[in-house]
Image: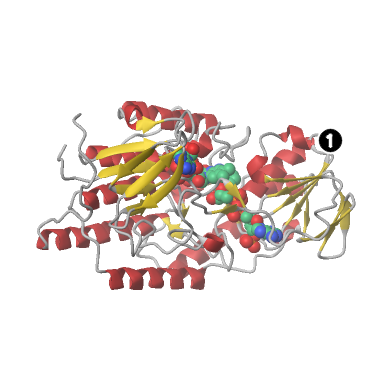
Amino acid sequence: MSTNLPRCAVIGAGSSGITALKALRDAGLDAVAFEASDRVGGNWVLGNRNGMSSAYEGLHINTSRERMEYTDFPMPKSYPDFPHHSQIAAYFDDYVDHFGLRPLIRFETRVERAERGPQGGWALTLGDGSVERFDALLVANGHHWDPRWPEPPFPGSDTFAGVQMHAHDYRSDEVLRDKDVVVLGMGNSAMDIAVESSYVARSTVLAARRGAWILPKHILGRPMDQLLKNDPRVPFAIRSRLMELIVRLVAGPPERYGLPKPDHRFGQAHPTVSGRILDRIGHGTITPKPNIARLEGDRVVFVDGTSVRADVVVYCTGYRITFPFFDEDLISAPDNRIELFRHVFHPDLDDVFFVGLLQPLGAIMPLAEEQGRWIADHLTGQYALPPRPEMRADIERELRAMRKRYVTSKRHTIQVDFEDYLHGIEQERRAGAQRARAAGFPLPVPRRTEVVAA
Ligand SMILES: Cc1cc2nc3c(=O)[nH]c(=O)nc-3n(C[C@H](O)[C@H](O)[C@H](O)COP(=O)(O)OP(=O)(O)OC[C@H]3O[C@@H](n4cnc5c(N)ncnc54)[C@H](O)[C@@H]3O)c2cc1C
Ligand SMILES: NC(=O)c1ccc[n+]([C@@H]2O[C@H](COP(=O)([O-])OP(=O)(O)OC[C@H]3O[C@@H](n4cnc5c(N)ncnc54)[C@H](OP(=O)(O)O)[C@@H]3O)[C@@H](O)[C@H]2O)c1
């Protein structure tokens, strides 16, 4: 290990943190990951003792196995196209053991504070009060654990007679058994929970403020994300029309099922995937409604003036991006907005990097894997960033494009298309390698921390 390379800390050993850790280790960097839980896998560990997992008993992935696996560690062929969460958690465990990463992870060690020194470098305050210093910090703390409740709360929610819960706290259908249930939202949590409710509840209503194009999990017998890979060379407008046509052919328009008509074209909202929701609506076991207007006693009143009695309201209203360990003035994401160069590099701070902080049309894991390799290249001097004004212009360009394409929502602030993003990174890494070579491969983050003999 070269002693002038920076010492790196990774916050989090979920699927993003473990692959970044591997990339750092493989590049010869001295790296350690801090993990609040007693195990890896983050969100995919049902009932994770970190209290941060949003997984429920019936959860299966909605990006297919081949889309989600790391490039150098295929999921077992015995796995189905859309494995159960327990299989996904086991896969991440196996990844860590296969590549010998476990000794590099400090389990049951929460990073409470991450403070940047005046000359750079990071002091991490850990759960036991001790402080450790690092030259570079990788943030992989996940972005689907801090529930976003309806903002502002619905009138009457403070006096509602029933139970109000967020999807983050939903673990199994037991809480819905024999109840009158209202599920709010049109994202993937709402689809899954409404479907589960439809089998056990007395009644299930699916309320939404906006319609969605609902993709089935399979098309022509293949996982839809295997069949409909995006070609970065094909303009978005054409891809979008093609997908919409396929959805219309397979399922018909959503309004045919009583759901709100989407106010956007396919691809202008994060994809909603469900092979079962339309079927359950078609069977009369789920009743679509527009948005909630207010809660009154034990009733939920919708914006069309209709109302239902409800025992449970499940808010599937998404998540907030938060970094509880940073000083908010230094790094935060108000309304889920955070400006990073290609979702990884901070344009003003040269020693902090983000992994997995994106919402892909496709799975997060192979993208996090590539981000980890990119950061490792950078920290070892093999990749040099463009000048700051160029990074800022690039960020602006991307934000403009995202705002233009996506419907306005706090859920659409870190969207990327899987293939386009990978293609973009590949090109940028090539350009940055040339910059690095021209400059004589300088190390962007100097080693300031003491070198501990191995
Ligand atoms: C219900 C649900 C289903 C999903 N399904 C899919 C899917 O099918 N496909 C897909 O690609 N994505 C899916 N996602 C998105 C999900 O974010 C990713 O699958 C994946 O969990 C992201 O991994 P991560 O490592 O970035 O975050 P996480 O899995 O959240 O892991 C973060 C880790 O960081 C640790 N941590 C956080 N803060 C600290 C701290 N301060 N100190 C120490 N450790 C800390 C946590 O303990 C945790 O282990 C789903 C999300 C949800 C909520
Ligand atoms: N593997 C799986 O099967 C699975 C299951 C669950 C979740 N996930 C993933 O987990 C992530 C989070 O998904 P999610 O469904 O929990 O959240 P989400 O994608 O952010 O969806 C939130 C939904 O709530 C609506 N909403 C937000 N605030 C509202 C309000 N005040 N009133 C009415 N509606 C409101 C949003 O509508 P607008 O669009 O109008 O903002 C949207 O329909 C996604 O990446 C998703 O793919 C995957």
**From where the camera sits, is residue 84 visible?**
no
Q: Is residue 260 above or below residue 324?
A: below
Q: In the rendering, at what x and y percent does residue 49 appear?
A: 56, 31
**From where the camera sits, is residue 287 visible?**
yes
Answer left or right for 384 relative to 342: left
Answer left or right for 80 relative to 24: right
Q: In the rendering, at what x and y percent does residue 15 appear?
A: 43, 39
Q: Is residue 253 above or below residue 318?
A: below
Instruction: Pick the residue in front: 378 or 185.
Output: 378
Q: Any atom of ligand 2 within 8 Å of the CB at mark 1? A: no
Local packing at callout 1 (Cα closer than 10 Å; few below 14, some 14-19, many 20+) is: some
Instruction: Pick the residue in front: 4 or 299.
Output: 4
Q: In the rendering, at what x and y percent does residue 251 appear?
A: 64, 54
Instruction: Pick the residue in front: 96 or 8.
Output: 8
Identify the residue position indicated by label 1 in the image.
178
Q: In the rendering, at what x and y percent does residue 382 appear?
A: 17, 53
Quarter of the image containing the C terminus?
top left
Q: Is residue 107 above or below residue 375?
A: above
Identity of the residue drawn at 71% across and 39% down: 196
Answer left or right for 203 relative to 425: right
